[in-house]
Amino acid sequence: MKTEIDLNIYTNIALESSLKLIKDYSKKPFEDATPIPSALNHSVEFYNHEQSRIFNQEWICIARCDEIPSSGDYITHEIAGTPVLVVRQESGDIKGFINACAHRFTCLVKEESGHAYAFTCPNHAWTYGIDGQLNHAPFMDLKSDFDVKENSLELIHIETWEGFIYLTLSQKPSKKISDSLGTFQKNIVGQYDMGSYKTVIRESMSWNTNWKNLIENFTESYHVPIAHPKTFAKHKKRIKDYECGEDSNHYCYHLAPQESENGPGAAHPKNTNLKGKWRRTMVDFCIFPNHLVTLMPDYLWWVSVMPNGVGQFKANWGVALPPEVINDIAEKDYESWLKDMISYMNTANEEDKALVEGLYKGSQSSRLPSGTYHPIEKNLWQFMRYISKITG
Ligand code: FES
Ligand SMILES: [Fe+2]
């Protein structure tokens, strides 16, 4: 019988060692900083620690609000092994629940999305309203003290921000996401009115790399002119014009203006929100821990990254467009426009996938130099310090 031997020296590194490493690395000022220790992207113990400290506690973006526009529309998701159910209410609010029946905890809804008037458990047919209240429990009248009102679905905290839905498995979230992102919204992204962008594409993907590698890839544009010849490099942004944002415990971003004030990447003539250089500026950001957005005056691309083992992640992603841009696409042209857009985004993802999976492979080497950051990779240093703070 063939025995598989794990040659990755970092797989079994103890949690204490990983924590000490990241603490030491994140103390360095940016100018002297080196990339995140490889152990953190390959260690099983650190991965489990991340699941408990990060994904079980932090605010996690799962979708855009306009994916569930009507009362009864729902989506499901899984965070750190916990299935969740998010439903639009009659009031227009959005509620979130643990996606497990209150009887003996069977997963209630299997579909990824849909519309429902009620949710019926496949096990013993307990039936809940879209507000999570138990309405019907067959034959439970045989139990004298049973009260349907005391057997509703477990509610979870949910918040919407700029058109995105966030939820947290924490019972007592330390801070509202809108408070954590207040400055960023006021000074930078608020002027784009992201909440008005309409979802046109919603997809998912799975790559063989650690989830943090995608966060790093997405939040630096140093690689764009080299790695994206068929897609983003065409915007002709000059690296010397890139500008990294302020330090924050909750987000990181950089700005990248393009040369042209017209055409792809620039604001539509009917866009009256954006002024001056903002009409041709991309904001590329991460809301920690796992929500990535490339925000352009004429579209946005978002990704929600979920670890699926040390060396694999699953990500949901989507594209949304400002109303004035959508309105400009003639109805007869929409299908072919959409096909081209999906193909463009898939090409960009393939361009990144090859190099991010290559980074994961290279970083498991037993002998590595110390590495360094380019000045416009400051977001990676911020992300490393966030990881250190939240896991320490
Ligand atoms: S587990 Fe859901 S009705 Fe029994
Ligand atoms: Fe990229």
Image (cartoon, rainbow, N blue to C red):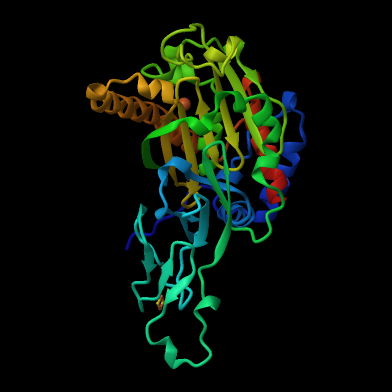
Instruction: Point out residue 54 in the picture as x, y percentages from the top left corner.
Output: 62, 51
Instruction: Point out residue 103 in the picture as x, y percentages from the top left corner.
Output: 46, 78
Residue 359 seen in the figure: yes
**Apparent side of residue 246 relative to residue 134 in the rendered image (left or right):** right
Using the rendered view, name the quadrant where residue 155 is placed: bottom right
Using the rendered view, name the quadrant where residue 130 is placed: bottom left
Using the rendered view, name the quadrant where residue 273 is placed: top right
Residue 370 seen in the figure: no
Instruction: Point out residue 284 in the picture as x, y percentages from the top left corner.
Output: 55, 26
Residue in the picture at 60% in, 15% down: 242
Above or below — where is 390 with respect to 336? Answer: below
- In the displayed image of the protein, which residue is found farthest to the front? 91
Q: Nearer the viewer, residue 144 or 124?
A: 144
Q: Ligand 1 falls in which quarter?
A: bottom left
**Apparent side of residue 210 relative to residue 112 in the rendered image (left or right):** right
Q: Nearer the viewer, residue 79 or 121?
A: 121
Above or below — where is 229 with respect to 384? Answer: above
Above or below — where is 342 with respect to 240? Answer: below
**Apparent side of residue 197 relative to residue 176 in the rendered image (left or right):** left
Of the 4 image quadrants, the one containing the N terminus is bottom left
Count how many numbered circles sit on residues in the image: 0
Instruction: Point out residue 188 in the picture as x, y percentages from the top left corner.
Output: 64, 24
Residue in the picture at 41% in, 80% down: 137
Above or below — where is 122 with respect to 356? Answer: below
